[in-house]
Every structure is written in structure tokens, then in C-alpha cells.
Amino acid sequence: MKRARLAFLVVPVVLAACSSSSHVSAPTIAPARTFQLAGFEPAQPVQPGRATTLAFTIDQPSGAPLTRYRRGPGPHTGVHLIVVRDDLAGPMIHHHPPVGTDGHVSDRMTFATPGRYRVLIDVYPASGPQRNFQLFRTIEVAGAYNPPPIPPFAPSVDVGGYRITIHGKPKLRAIQSAFLTVTVADAGGRPARFTPWFGALAHAIFFRAGTLSYFHTHVCGANTPACAGAFGATRISGHSSTPGRLSVGVLLPQSGTWRLFLQCKAGGTVLTAPFTLRVR
Ligand SMILES: [Cu+2]
């Protein structure tokens, strides 16, 4: 659509510019050069419950593969692979796969249940005007898919022997930053001791129901250098200085129903707790 309109706009200008010459050639309008996924696997629907290779290369606007990614101790590095089922009810997968010297990224993951899955690739190139950008794909996992409605807000989620609780009912508004107070306690009610994971004490990954818009913040602690960074033009990060307690920064661009997948590492295990948030 955009391309057609561009062609329409550009051709008369070229004709006018060339009107005094003896011959006129119509310009060829190429699509805008952007970063794009190449050689994405799986190219076909996959089977549930079976380890699957997910692989790709990111081609730069020049056409050459992107091989140099931002590196460092913080979470804003490399390639983040985030996978959710479209209904946002199921689990979330968050990997930082290694990048080959030729730019090829390959990972293994298992899709537990049938359905449509959103693959979000959050990319931090080593150089260039953009700090990071996202690319998307959909993977179909074979079988009957009856997506359940998103559950209402519930303050506590039990996962991996821990209870993760949001304190107070969140009152969130689009484009207004807020902080959620979250506690993580073991089965005996003792506060969890967090281990930094991917450069942060916790990762807060948000997807909006329906459109699957995405946002991602981090909770930083004393031992997470380079954790607090910019998210595009936005700077927001939470912090934690007390065992078992997290202050999670939220800044969502649109109203609607969002799912927060809160991830932290406690007792050697990565915990992922999904919460439903209404944003006015
Ligand atoms: Cu993260």
C-alpha cells in the first residue's frame, strides 16, 4: 500500500524533471531497507511437546548479516528471544541464545501445548542509531487450540515452591510510570534471596492482550552493574535492596489488558509469574 502510493508520488516528479530530455525512464522503487529476519526456522508447523530448533539470521539494511551485538554485564545485550502463546495464558520462554560468528542464532525449545505462538526477537546491535529493536514471527504448534480467556487480576502466583505477590491493587494508566511492590517468599514464608539473572534481579516482560504489544523493564540491585538502562527513549527500572522484595517499574504505552510475566531467580531456579493488569 505504502509502496504503491510512493511510486505514484514519485513518478510524476521524475517525469517533470526529465521533461526537457529526449527519453523518460520510470524509476524502480525498492522497498525501504530495514533489519529483517532471514532463514527463520521452523518454517512449518511444529509438534507440541517436542524439542524444536528455532534459528535465524538478522540481515542488516545493507543485506549483510548482523554479527556484532552489544556486549556487557547488563541485560541490554545480544539477542533476547521471548516466546508466548497468543492468548498470553500459557508460559513464557525468555532465552538469550548465543550468536555465531557468522551471525547465525540457533536455540532449542519445546512448545508444551498447541496454538499460535508469538516469537519476539529483541535485538541490541553493537552500533547504529537504534539501541535496540524488535522483530516478530509466528509459530504454529499443531493440535486443537481453544484459547482460554485471560484470567482476572490475582495478587499472588505460586510457582516453583515460591509465592510471588503484588501488594495493593495496581492502579495503572497508559504513559504514566508506576511502581509495583512485589514480594517473593518460599514455602515457609521466608523472603527469597535473588540471584542476578541476565544482568538483573528481575525481568518484567509485558504483553498487551490482542495486539501483543511488548514492553520490558528490569529490577536492579547492588550487584547488577549496567542494569538500569534506556528502553528506546524511555528510562525506567525498578530496584531491590531487601531480600524477597522487588520494586517493579511499569510504563505502558496503551490502555487495555496486559499480562506481566515477572521473572526472577531464587534458590537456583528461574521463576516466571504471570499477572493480569488493567491499564486505563
Ligand atoms: Cu530482561
Image (tube, rainbow, N blue to C red):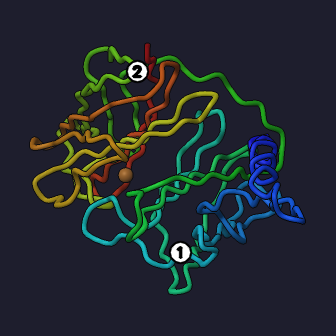
The answer to whether 273 appears left or right of 223 in the picture is: right
The answer to whether 162 appears left or right of 57 in the picture is: left
| Distance (Cα) linking label 2 and label 1 | 34 Å
- Residue at 76% over, 42% down: 9
Nearest the viewer among 123 and 239 is 123
Pointer 2 with pointer 1, Cβ within 8 A: no
The part of the image, by quadrant, that contains residue 59 is: bottom right
Amino acid type at circle 1 is: Leu
- Residue at 43% over, 34% down: 260
Q: Classify mark 2: residues with Cα within 10 Å, few (<14), some (14-19) or many (20+).
A: some
Q: Secondary structure at mark 1?
A: loop
Q: Is residue 132 above or below residue 2?
A: below
Mark 2 — residue? Answer: 174
Amino acid type at circle 2 is: Ala
The answer to whether 231 appears left or right of 183 in the picture is: right
**Could you say where residue 119 lies in the image, as x and y percent from the top left?**
62, 52
Q: Is residue 16 above or below residue 279?
A: below
Mark 1 — residue? Answer: 66
Quadrant for the N terminus in the image: top right
